[in-house]
Image (cartoon, rainbow, N blue to C red):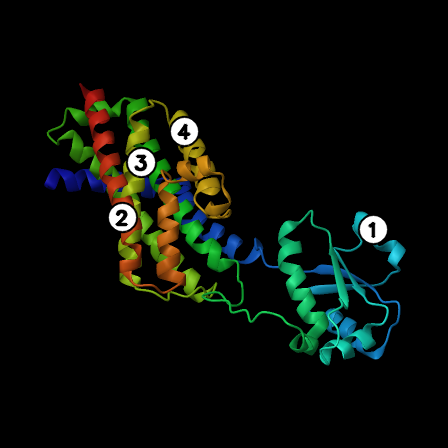
Amino acid sequence: MGEFLSFVRKETLHILRDSRTMLVVLLAPVIQLLLFGFAISTEVNNVRVAVVAPHRSESVRQAVERVAANPYFTFEGYISQQEIDRTLRAGRADAVAVFAADFDRKVDALSRGESSEAILQLIFDASNTTLATAGSTYLQSIILGDLQGSMPMPDTRLLYNPQMKSAYNFVPGIMGLIFILICAMMTSVSIVREKETGTMEVLLVSPVRPIRIIFAKMVPYFTLSCLNLLTILLLARYVLDVPLAGNVVALVALSLLYLILSLALGLFFSTITNKQSTALLISAMLLMMPVIMFSGMIFPIENLPVVLRAISCVVPTRWYIEAVRKLMIEGLPFVSVIRETAILAAMTVALIGVALRKFNDKLE
């Protein structure tokens, strides 16, 4: 055990002396989390709205004033019916609200239940689908105001994220992306560096068993990842106002399992290459794009074709993000993530077994 701890201490000191590695491992996750929490957002903001109103009655002016006063919309003025297409094509507006010519009369008839004619038409530039889908409903509610009470509209309830904050969606995704990149990439590069410089052979002839040497190199990165986990949870809760609604102990335990899986993945990558640049490239190419595309971090899994949905099942981050959302955002008990936990545990055991076997084959 003393030799093992000596190797852990040696690797820890090596990492601490490498300021660039420490900067990447500790500062990059914070920057990414704050970027996705504040700067990069799927919420609707600064939507430019033009209005077509053949008769600018008092109710029409009040509706337009509500749009102009709303911080999410920018009123771009009145235009004619003939200018709608030209305005949208020129990019001078993102949406056009067209009031019916006899708006007041139709509103009165609608309130008495004597008519079901449309009183408002919303025309959006759907080249930005997020703006078109999210902005149309909100803009309609702002324009119609109290008039919606007289319309046969469904009663909508938004669970878990009533304010539709994008941070609620991004934080679990960023956790999954950061942990697998840091653990897998740094571990693989660290082990391959020993091979490339020729020091791995020196380490292997020492009295310490090879498996202990490998685990000793993983311990410092596991510790740094635990520190990242603590930092991300604190930032998410107290800076981004993302709730920790579920069992925090279960969330931490699940994250530790995911960290071990990521370390095993890094060990596996280190067995298939002998150069740091190649290990870095393999880690980046085989991890970043699949994690972003197939984990549900940005794009819903349900929107993928059947073949790609099947491929997403082998991406560990998909199961981790699903479990974190249930524990952190929905506040569900640990029982609800038993399936995801079992899948991650099976992946961890399989990766460790394959990686150690390939590593031993390399030694032989």
Distance between mark 3 and mark 2 Cα atoms: 12 Å
Mark in front: 3 vs 1: 1
Question: In the rendered view of the protein, which quadrant contains the N terminus?
Answer: top left
Q: Regarding mark 1 in the picture, which secondary structure is present there?
A: helix
Q: Is residue 81 above or below residue 202?
A: below
Q: Are marks 4 and 2 in contact (CB under 8 Å)?
A: no
Q: Residue furthest front?
A: 114
**In terms of sequence position, does the residue under pointer 3 or pointer 2 come before the other?**
2
Kind of residue indicated by mark 3: Leu
Kind of residue indicated by mark 2: Leu
Mark in front: 2 vs 1: 1
Q: Are marks 1 and 4 in contact (CB under 8 Å)?
A: no
Q: Residue at x 87, y 73 (%)?
A: 56
Kind of residue indicated by mark 1: Asp
Residue receiving disc 3? 265
Distance between mark 3 and mark 4 Cα atoms: 11 Å
Q: Is residue 104 above or below residue 355?
A: below
**In terms of sequence position, does the residue under pointer 4 or pointer 2 come before the other?**
2
Distance between mark 4 and mark 2 Cα atoms: 23 Å
Q: Are marks 3 and 4 in contact (CB under 8 Å)?
A: no
Residue receiving disc 2? 257
Q: How many marks?
A: 4
